[in-house]
Amino acid sequence: CLVSAPELPILERRNWLIHLHYIRKDYETCKAMIKEQLQETQGMCEYAIYVQALILRLEGQIQPSLELFQSCAILNPTSPDNLKQVARSLFLLGKHKAAIEVYHEAGKLNEKDWEINHNLGVCYSFIKDFQNQLNAALQLKKHDRTFMTLGKVHLLAGDTNKAIEVYKSALGKYQKAFEHLGNALTYDPNNYKAILAAGSMMQTHGDFDVAMNKYRVAACMVPESPPLWNNIGMCFFGKKKYVAAISCLKRAHYLSPFDWKVLYNLGLVHLTMQQYASAFHFLSAATNLQPRLGELYMLLAVALTNLEDVDNARRSYEQAVALDQSNPLVNLNFAILLYNHGDKKGALQQYQEMERKVNILKDSNTEFDPELMDMAQKMAASLQVGESLEWTKPVKDPKSKQRSAGAPSKTPGSSQQPLGTNQALEQAMSSAAGYNKSITLPTGVSPHSQPTPPSLALEEEPDVETTPTRAPQPEESDPSTTLPPLAAKPKVKKSKLMQELN
């Protein structure tokens, strides 16, 4: 008689069910299916182990997930995905050097992987070894996350100019980005992220009413979104409806009480409304959350000056000058405060520092706001130093009147908008375009605005792992880009404050 061959278990026969339950986030059923699969295969099913490791990492069990990913790497040592997950778990455990070694091994298996190069750059930045790995990642893929991380690395290395160049190169192609957003909305008109991004770009270029229409649609889907209410508030700010702006910003602050950009915006609006005590309250809270931004301290100093607290205003200016290495307006305002209170020697020192910064900016063919030029010339006459500065010719474009004093910009005809990092209130990515110069505040405080490059107003998402058809390959999130971002953070509208000479 014939003897039939024994039936051998098919290792992958439940993989499709495991995959289905995983992407549906039905993790309990998924774990039950994985258990059955591993029992049948004596623990030799790579896919089941991989997904179990993903679930454990989502549940916060990083060490057990690492051990399972290592098992996957043993079962299939030629898979770069297994090694990437081992490296990611090591990174989450704070073992950055070990993660770097594993990422390098994964890179040998796939040299054209953007994700590997990007995450290598992130790991190197955590051990203060600023490699060029992020540049290699950008050569493979122009990803906004890599641009943001590279900019942050340059800032950590103390090279502000390179950071500015990186951000400018990342933010230059507005039209192409807008076309892609339009295509996304064509396929999915209810995608609130694309709606927020499109509204943000419109808002950046001063189309407040059109942006508000976009935000109304998004508000129906995500009514509790802090970036949404922040941007709506700054739309009202751009339309000079300050009470409505404060109302929306306070809602954003209620939803996200530790977002320094919302606090910054609240301080700005209160400063514009001459409510200096309230402005001081919000700006001081913002400095506690973002203590490395010089422009925040300058704004704080302006509020303190209007509150007649000269000593603390001086200390705030000193902190602003120590933190900011490129904005001539910080030094000019500090010089004005010192001159107005009889310290001509200190005022002269700050004026000379302003001259140094202006001369550096001139070398890059920048142009300056006429009001900064006029104030600097008045200051020079008061200090009897003559008109030693040779300013570039002011921009003749009518829109230049909306720029803040001292903000360097590209020459006319440039396809890129200025980054706005050289203005007291223009450094962060602005979500609202400007308002004109008709508003006047006490002690010479006058708000202006400058359209700056857009930054998508998207909320940060949790790091949810996803799986492809065959083997799960979750998108790597970058823990180093959790700073206000750049990408994926609320928009900030800022203005210029210029003090008057007595």
Image: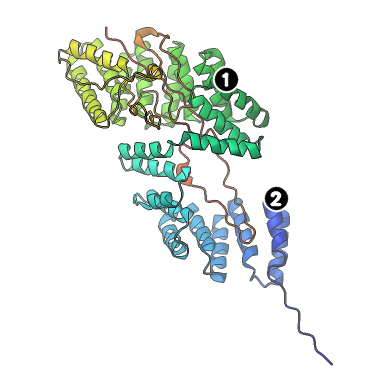
Viewport quadrant of the N terminus: bottom right
Alpha-carbon neighbours of circle 1 within 10 Å: few (<14), some, or many (≥20)? some
Q: CA distance from mark 2 to mark 1?
A: 38 Å
Q: Is residue 67 left or right of residue 365?
A: right
- For marks 2 and 1, the one nearer the N-term is 2
Q: Which mark is residue 382?
A: none
The answer, for residue 70, to whether it is visible in the render is yes
Expressed as whole percent of the image width and height from the top left, the position of residue 241 reads 53, 13
Query: In the image, what residue type sits under mark 2?
Result: Arg
Q: Secondary structure at mark 1?
A: helix
Viewport quadrant of the C terminus: top left
Expressed as whole percent of the image width and height from the top left, the position of residue 394 reads 30, 19
Q: Are marks 2 and 1 in contact (CB under 8 Å)?
A: no
Q: Which mark is residue 24?
A: 2
Q: Secondary structure at mark 2?
A: loop
The number of callouts visible is 2
- Location of mark 1 (residue): 209
Query: In the image, what residue type sits under mark 1?
Result: Asp
